[in-house]
Image (cartoon, helix red, strand yellow):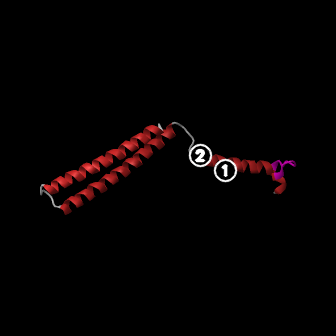
């Protein structure tokens, strides 16, 4: 599943590069034909690039949400879940050692 996601991201980056090059090529062609000025081409290219970056960011957020939903539905533990369990275990171990000290345990002697 992760490999599929990595391949999709790589493909998306490849498409973005090709698209950027195609946009630049088209804008250069329009400038050569005199349909727009070089300044207009630059502004238009910048605007298209900014919109593309915004769309890419939006797609990243949506993909992240999709995978989080997928993991949630799969009922897998997250790193936050594991950290909470570790903290709970440390707390319980501490309470247990205070309630039932073990004279042979060097940790209890140090406290």
Quarter of the image for residue 11 reads: top left
Residue under pointer 2: 81
Residue found at x 38% / y 52%? 57
Label pair 1/2, CB-CB below 8 angstroms: no
Q: Residue at x 41, y 44 (%)?
A: 63
Q: Secondary structure at mark 1?
A: helix
Would residue 97 be found to the left or right of residue 64 on screen?
Answer: right
Out of 72 and 110, give the one closest to the viewer: 110
66 relative to 50, above or below: above
- Magenta span dominant secondary structure: loop
* Above or below, 87 relative to 77: below
Estimate the x, y position of residue 107 in percent, counting from the top left.
81, 52
Q: Where residue 86 sits: x, y (%)? A: 66, 47
Percent x, y of residue 9: 40, 44
Span shown in magenta: 99-106
Disc sitting over residue 26 in the figure = none
Determine the secondary structure under disc 2: helix
Q: Nearer the viewer, residue 45 or 58?
A: 45
Q: Mark 1 or 2 closer to N-term?
A: 2
Q: From this view, report whether residue 70 is shown above or below residue 101.
A: above
Estimate how packed mark 1 is, as few (under 14), some (14 to 19) or many (20 or more) residues with alpha carbons within 10 Å. Answer: few
Q: Residue furthest left?
A: 34
Q: Residue at left 46%, top 38%? A: 3
| Residue 23 is covered by the magenta coloring | no
42 relative position to 88: left or right: left
Quadrant (top left, top right, bottom left, bottom right) of the C terminus: bottom right
| Residue 17 on image: x %, y % | 32, 49
Report the residue marked by disc 1.
Answer: 87
């Amino acid at each position: 599943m992760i490999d599929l996601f990595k391949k999709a991201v790589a493909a998306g980056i490849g498409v973005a590069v090709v698209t950027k090059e195609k946009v630049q090529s088209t804008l250069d062609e329009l400038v050569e034909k005199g349909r727009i000025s070089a300044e207009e081409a630059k502004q238009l290219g910048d605007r298209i690039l900014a919109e593309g970056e915004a769309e890419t960011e939006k797609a990243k957020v949506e993909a992240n949400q999709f995978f989080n939903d997928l993991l949630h539905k799969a009922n897998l533990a997250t790193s936050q879940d594991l950290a909470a369990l570790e903290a709970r275990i440390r707390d319980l171990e501490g309470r247990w050692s205070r309630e039932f000290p073990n004279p042979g345990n060097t940790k209890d002697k140090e406290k």
